[in-house]
Image (tube, rainbow, N blue to C red):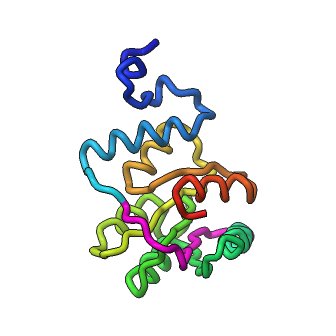
Amino acid sequence: MPAAAEAGAPPRASEAPEDDTAAIVAAAKAMRDRFAPGTVPAATARVCLIVDDSRVIRKVSSKIARSLGYVAVEAENGEEALARCKQAMPDLVLTDWNMPEMDGIEFVSKLRAIPTPKEPVVVFCTSNGEAKDIHDGIAAGADDYIVKPFDEAALKAKLEKLGRG
């Protein structure tokens, strides 16, 4: 058993199976929180911003968000999403990584730099599923990560885990 696991610390990416996204996310969050402590305050969820250059993914994600009681707002790239967030900060952001204009990593980094009393929960919904990608997404400021293709049940379970279901 690795020393980190014995000490109760989250597993490092190299110790977690590549398909175990939850373990990788936990390890990445532990690393991020060591350098930038703080938590996202709990709040009553109302608005979900869906950021994806695929119209189909935005529509499917919007349907899921509405089924969970959110008002769904869409943006097709990071620049548009950032402008929407500066106007009114959403409670939840579901974002793709690979988009034109501004990718998801840059968007999340810039989103987290906006001073706001109500930080949104951010979940990457992307096809980038390698352990390094997950670490990079969490390090940029995402709260969780789900790899495409995902179904409604998987996204709902992820959001419930985050207290946003």
Pick out the residue farthest to the top. 1
Highlighted magenta segment, given as a residue range? 40-56
Residue occupying the point 30% across, 73% down: 114
Residue occupying the point 46% across, 83% down: 84
Residue 55 appears anywhere in the view: no
Query: Where residue 30 appears, x then y in whole percent?
Result: 36, 40
The answer to whether residue 43 is magenta is yes
Q: Is residue 81 above or below residue 57?
A: below
The answer to whether residue 64 is magenta is no
Viewed as shown, does residue 115 lie left or right of 74?
A: left
Of 148 and 93, the residue lying toward us: 93
- The C terminus is located in which quarter? bottom right
Q: Is residue 12 above or below residue 90?
A: above
Residue occupying the point 41% across, 41% down: 28
Viewed as shown, does residue 74 lie left or right of 64?
A: left
Q: Is residue 61 above or below residue 135?
A: below
Pick out the residue farthest to the bottom. 87
Q: Is residue 37 above or below residue 49?
A: above
Of 93 and 55, the residue lying toward us: 93
Query: Where residue 142 appears, x then y in whole percent?
Result: 44, 56
Number of residue marks: 0
Q: Quadrant of residue 63?
A: bottom right
Residue 158 appears anywhere in the view: yes
Viewed as shown, does residue 138 lie left or right of 37?
A: right
Query: Where residue 24 appears, x then y in whole percent?
Result: 50, 37
Residue occupying the point 35% across, 21% down: 7
Viewed as shown, does residue 59 lie left or right of 74?
A: right
